[in-house]
Amino acid sequence: MKGKIPASIDEYIESFPEATRKILEQVRATVRKAAPKAEEAIKYAMPTYDMNGNLVHFAAFTNHIGFYPTPAGTDEFK
C-alpha cells in the first residue's frame, strides 16, 4: 500500500492483489491463534498486534512479506 495509511488491517489487506491477500490472511490467522487477546491496529502504516505493547508488525512488499516481532512479541510466541 503506497501513499495512504489504512484505517484497519482489513483495509490494508484489501489493497493488495488476491495472491498477496491470501498470504496476509494466513499471517493474520497465525498471529491471532498465537495471541488471541492481542488487539489489532495499524502502526507505522503496517498491521500490528498489541498486547501490553507491540507484539508484532507485518507488511507486504513486491517480492516478500515482512514479519517484525518486537522483543515483547518474541517472548510471547515462545
Image: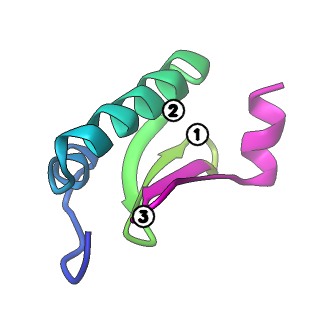
Whole-number angstrom distance, CA of label 2 to CA of label 3: 24 Å
Crowdedness of circle 1 by 10 Å Cα count: few (<14), some, many (20+)?
some
N-terminal-most mark, 3 or 1: 1
The amino acid marked with disc number 1 is Met
Q: Are marks 3 and 1 in contact (CB under 8 Å)?
A: no
From the top left corner, tell me how far across and down residue 28 is, in percent: 42, 32
SS state under label 1: loop
Q: Which residues are magenta?
A: 56-78
Residue that mark 2 sits on: 38
Whole-number angstrom distance, CA of label 2 to CA of label 1: 5 Å
Of 67 and 76, the residue lying toward us:
67
Crowdedness of circle 3 by 10 Å Cα count: few (<14), some, many (20+)?
few
Residue that mark 1 sits on: 51
Residue 10, compared with residue 53, is above or below; it is above
Closest to the camera, between mark 3 and mark 1, is 3
Residue 54, compared with residue 33, is above or below; it is below
From the top left corner, tell me how far across and down residue 59 is, in percent: 45, 57
From the top left corner, tell me how far across and down residue 43 is, in percent: 43, 65
SS state under label 3: loop
Label disc, if present, on residue 61 of the rendered structure: 3
N-terminal-most mark, 2 or 1: 2
Residue 53 part of the magenta segment: no
x 42%, y 27%: residue: 26
Q: Residue furthest bottom?
A: 3
The amino acid marked with disc number 2 is Ala
SS state under label 2: loop
